[in-house]
């Protein structure tokens, strides 16, 4: 096989071109990122051979002038048997760089196993009432998913059958002058069988980007700043790893009347002076329906009443908080003479000093 074709290059490619092509291909076919994949291993061996030969000026000129690609004995062992340092070309530095690049890109150790997919983060805005009662919301999420074309294998399905390059023999013969060369077929890595190629829609990665509408259930009582987790709706895992999760940060719009503190709701209730003085039953439009508050006679402004379990539902244990009502006394507008006369008389009868505590 043509060494330039192996690297996807034109004849006469420059040294930087060769390096770049090698790095690009090695990142995809290096055995450390395709553990146990014999196809990738064989492909990487070809790439490495082509790279070494073309990067060595002597060997490259021999190859260009019609010599063999690699005069050494063909390798039969697995990739593990290689000793990079013992090879003829000094490419250790660039190889080390590449290695670091490959590993940091994948974020894994030298023998990467299954990798969990990344978590995704979204924000959702809710009205006060929706957050109080709980609500289901559709959320458009763009995620990395298993490629549908190759079912995540990164390879195209090929029909079983002999390799068309070597007609199933696993070896290719070439005649140069009176010499007949036979070498392991590069098209099938010597197996004689057709082998799968990288899946085109996903470039062999096994994943594709898809948009999906996720129905997100917001539990009753969800509060501003809460984070809701939807398990498994992050990016798909790599090499059989678990998918990541989808995290949704909740933003709850403020309410005109109710203010949430923990799971308690707080509100200020305007009360007329005669209601506060004589006592009254007052209907309160609580978020879950009308609540009745009994204001006892002699209630003062600023006094607080607590309606048990009429607050928000706790997302931790499902218990309800309280509704805390603070009374604010409201003065009537006193537009008529009769009301004023009554209050004057009221003042005469109740001569006590209301400022006793501050005088
Ligand atoms: Zn695919
Ligand atoms: Zn073949």
Image (cartoon, rainbow, N blue to C red):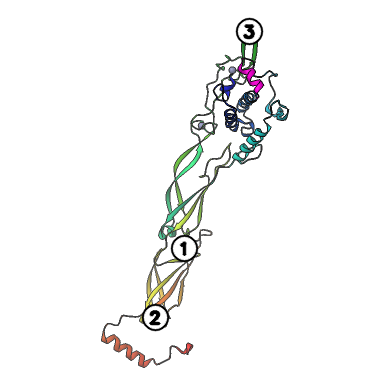
**Residue 167 placed where, x, y %?**
57, 14
Residue lying at the far right of the rendered structure: 86
Magenta run includes residue 322: no
Q: For disc 1, does the CB lie below 8 Å from ligand 1?
A: no
- Between 201 and 231, the one lying in front of the other is 201
Label the magenta part by its dominant secondary structure.
helix
Question: Image point 71% across, 25% down: which residue?
Answer: 88
Is residue 113 in sight in this rendering? no
Secondary structure at numbered mark 1? loop
| Mark nearer the N terminus (2 vs 3) | 3
Q: Nearer the viewer, mark 1 or mark 3?
A: 3
Question: Image point 44% across, 42% down: which residue?
Answer: 212
Q: Which mark is residue 135?
A: none
Assess whether mark 1 and mark 2 are in contact (beta carbons under 8 angstroms): no
Residue 336 located left or right of residue 227: left
Question: Image point 48% across, 38% down: which residue?
Answer: 209
Is residue 32 in sight in this rendering? yes
Q: Name the residue under label 2.
A: 276
Magenta residues?
56-68
Q: Nearer the viewer, mark 2 or mark 3?
A: 3
Query: Separation of disc 2 and disc 3 at Cα?
Result: 116 Å
Task: State whether residue 280 is above or below residue 127.
Answer: below
Secondary structure at numbered mark 2? helix
**Residue 34 placed where, x, y %?**
61, 32
Q: Mark 3 points at which residue?
A: 177
- Between 66 and 25, the one lying in front of the other is 66
Secondary structure at numbered mark 3? loop
| Mark nearer the N terminus (2 vs 1) | 2
Query: Separation of disc 1 and disc 3 at Cα?
Result: 90 Å
- Between 201 and 72, the one lying in front of the other is 72
Q: Mark 1 points at which residue?
A: 312
């Amino acid at each position: 096989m043509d060494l330039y074709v192996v690297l996807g290059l034109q004849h006469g490619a420059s040294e930087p071109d060769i390096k770049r092509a090698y790095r690009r291909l090695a990142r995809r076919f290096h055995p450390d990122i395709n553990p146990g994949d014999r196809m990738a291993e064989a492909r990487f061996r070809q790439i490495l051979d082509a790279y070494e030969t073309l990067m060595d000026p002597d060997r490259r000129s021999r190859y260009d002038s019609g010599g063999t690609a690699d005069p050494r004995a063909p390798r039969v062992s697995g990739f593990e048997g290689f000793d990079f340092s013992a090879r003829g070309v000094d490419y250790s530095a660039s190889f080390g760089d590449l290695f670091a690049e490959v590993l940091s890109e994948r974020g894994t150790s030298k023998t990467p196993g299954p990798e969990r997919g990344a978590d995704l983060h979204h924000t959702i805005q809710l009205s006060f009432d929706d957050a109080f009662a709980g609500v289901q919301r559709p959320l458009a999420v763009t995620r990395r998913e298993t490629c549908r074309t190759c079912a995540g294998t990164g390879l195209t399905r090929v029909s079983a059958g002999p390799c068309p390059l070597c007609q199933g023999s696993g070896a290719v013969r070439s005649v140069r002058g009176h010499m007949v060369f036979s070498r392991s077929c590069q098209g099938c890595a010597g197996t004689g069988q057709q082998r799968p190629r990288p899946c085109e829609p996903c470039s062999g990665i096994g994943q594709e980007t898809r948009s999906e509408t996720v129905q997100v259930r917001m539990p009753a009582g969800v509060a501003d700043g809460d984070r809701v987790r939807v398990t498994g709706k992050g990016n798909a895992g790599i090499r059989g790893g678990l998918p990541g999760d989808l995290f949704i940060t909740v933003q709850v719009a403020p309410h005109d009347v109710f203010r949430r503190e923990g799971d308690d709701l707080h509100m200020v209730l305007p009360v007329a002076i005669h209601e506060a003085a004589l006592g009254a039953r007052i209907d309160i439009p609580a978020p879950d329906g009308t609540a009745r508050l009994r204001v006892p006679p002699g209630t003062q402004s600023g006094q607080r009443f607590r309606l048990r379990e009429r607050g928000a539902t706790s997302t931790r244990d499902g218990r309800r908080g309280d509704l805390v009502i603070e009374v604010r006394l409201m003065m009537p507008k006193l537009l008529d003479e009769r009301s004023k006369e009554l209050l004057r008389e009221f003042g005469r009868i109740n001569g006590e000093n209301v400022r006793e505590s501050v005088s």
